[in-house]
Amino acid sequence: MFSRVLIANRGEIACRIMRTLDAMGIESVLVHSARDRAMAYVREHPRAVQLPDSDRTGGYLDVAAIVSIAVTQGCDALHPGYGFLSENPELVRACEAAGIAFIGPRAESMAALGDKAQARAIAVRAGVPVVPGTEDLDAGRALPLPILIKPVAGGGGKGMHVVNEIAEFDELAARARREASASFGDDRLLFEKYLPRARHIEVQVVGLPGGEVIALGDRECSLQRRHQKVIEEAPAPNLPDAIRTAIHAAAESVVREVGYINAGTVEFVVSCDDPAEFYFLEVNTRLQVEHPVTEAVTGIDLVRVQIDVAHAQAHQHSAKEVAELLRERRDAGACGHACEARVYSENPAVGFLPSAGPVLLAQWSTNARVDTGYRTGDVVSAGYDPMIAKVITTGHDRTSALASMDAALAESAVLGISTNIAFLRALVQDTQVQSGLADTRFIDREAARLAVAEPLPWWLPALAAATWAQFGADKAAREHRAPVSAWSLGWRVTGDSGVSRWQATCDAELMTCDVSRDSSNPHQWRVHHGHHNFVVALSHADTALTCTVRNEHDAFEGTVSVSTRRTATADELWLAHDGRAWAMLSGTTVTGTEHAHSSPHVRSPMPGTVTAVLVEAGESVSGGQPLVVLEAMKMEHQVVAPHAGVVAELACAVGAHVRLREVLAIVEPT
């Protein structure tokens, strides 16, 4: 077996591969960018090597540097993880030239199947139906609506857009070219018929050195937003056995056509109205992000399979034991059901804007498998993918697996950044999702309903005020000084003896609370908020806050996750409960959305890179007109004019790296 393997990836991917290598007794070498140097998993690794900052990813796509490190570190194999680098044939060829085994398919297979246009031709040759489409721009414009535009190279939903009105075709094609060029270094596009009501189903395949291909089950990946998967499951529900068998056979045929070796995924689009109408979509010549659900229902470690197959191929011997195991598990069928939810650093309530920054607390359910590269204290960078974790649950059937997922998400909390955990809970609780009949456009259609910010719980302002008071009192006691001096921006003493007033904003809502300590209990506080009086009892241990909140009519008892942070403009108190999280900002008069429609200053809603400036100084614009395009976390986002007016100033240029709330333009209203 291999003795030392270089992991050419980062975050959750690197940690996932490392786990299997450790279990197999194989040493690993970890590469990392400068911005990932402080990540916990990097600091704790005994053989972590920093990459030269040679590209926009910090070196993760630098083939020459990665292979050079593998040689210098004495590695006899390289695992690319899953992502853009893992589908780069040049990496495979560079490994071969250096005498290093590549844990993945051959360069020829990767090149043929990684190019979506070539892959379509291969599928046709294999007798597998494909979606009608073309690479020609004019022919693409003539396709019946809706039309799907997607890059010929790459994957992961990057650069994919659906044209619903022909008037938007040229704009979306230009945008897709920019995204494809930035993400894959290849701006070629493919234009395809888009099925309005379709499912996205994929098949896990493993090609063996002897030429055998084994389909190891299927996955449902229809719950997507902007073509980026959100929740996946195995096996695909509501799929007739005959259709399932036919799709598996089609997947095997496509990869067999190119002599594919190692793990891969063949993706299909399936009509919701008639599952017998299915089309080949593409092949991912790597392991997929969602591979854990297949592992859960088969009991197979797919990373180990990759390593075993690569070792057999490198040493020119059969993978007999692997083949026997795969056949056995394939013939046994899926055991139970599994779901995976992707936790993204984004804010669904404000258009799914990316969120970046320090993670004050990362707390996950102990009743689920959680694959993540982030821990408390790590920093989520705007330069990388927004996925920060995957939560995987199982059950004897689909209903129990979804229920376990809902419970696991309710027990999870990430503080310091915004995440989609509450949105994921809304998804798994939705009746259409539970029915197994959601299509690929379900989230895009229902996002406004599912992502709407719920009203703040009645007990939250009182609990937040009491928590700040308790923390301040504890700090004052440690420092042997009066409690009032522990308070900063959010506090002032009222006219009543022993009563302090706390003000903070949460979700742009102002909270004002009068707080005093209960004379009979140092951990109990009396809070007046609105027209109600509250009694709040607290017990604080590390990041857990056990509390009871009572007013004249209601009572809340539970455990709330808590963390605090002081910034240049505000004191922050973060609380999380039941899958929801709230940030209370005290001492600040400006929130992320304040003055959005009145100020002439157009600010960046996130850290990112300017990829396009769409207007000129002096130009008249209408309200909602796109002004600037930002790229953050590998996705493009348009910043629009807050009102009709004239562009008085442009404060940014293409290629500029901008901070959160940095002024991009000034639009004087007319």
Image (cartoon, helix red, strand yellow):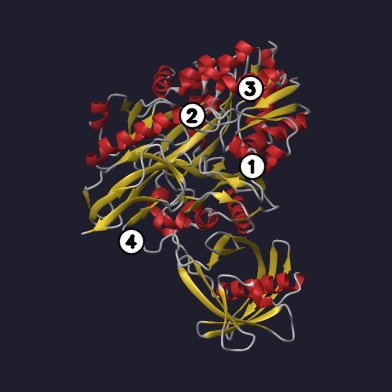
Q: Quadrant of residue 547?
A: bottom right
Q: In the rendered image, is residue 262 in sight?
A: no
Q: Residue 274's spot in the image, x, y percent?
A: 39, 39
Q: Secondary structure at mark 1?
A: loop
The Cα–Cα distance between marks 3 and 2, rounded to whole angstroms, is: 29 Å
Identify the mark nearer the N-term, 3 or 2: 3
Q: Residues within 10 Å of mark 3 (few under 14, many from 20)?
A: many
Amino acid under disc 2: Ala
Q: Which is more toward the observer, 172 or 664?
A: 664
Q: Residue 484's spot in the image, x, y percent?
A: 65, 77
User: Which residue is under mark 2?
Assistant: 246
* Residue reaching furthest to the bottom: 496
Amino acid under disc 1: Gly
Q: Are marks 4 and 2 in contact (CB under 8 Å)?
A: no
User: Which residue is under mark 4?
Assistant: 599
Q: Residue 480's spot in the image, x, y percent?
A: 76, 73
Q: Quadrant of residue 596?
A: bottom left
Q: Secondary structure at mark 3?
A: loop
Which of pointers 3 and 4 indicates the residue nearer the eye?
A: 4
Which of pointers 1 and 3 indicates the residue nearer the eye?
A: 1
Q: In the rendered image, is residue 75 in sight?
A: yes
User: Which residue is under mark 3?
Assistant: 103
Identify the mark nearer the N-term, 1 or 2: 2
Kindly identify the residue that appears in the image at 43 percent across and 26 percent down.
185
Which of pointers 1 and 2 indicates the residue nearer the eye?
A: 1
The Cα–Cα distance between marks 1 and 4, rounded to whole angstroms, is: 39 Å
Tell me the number on the disc at residue 373: 1
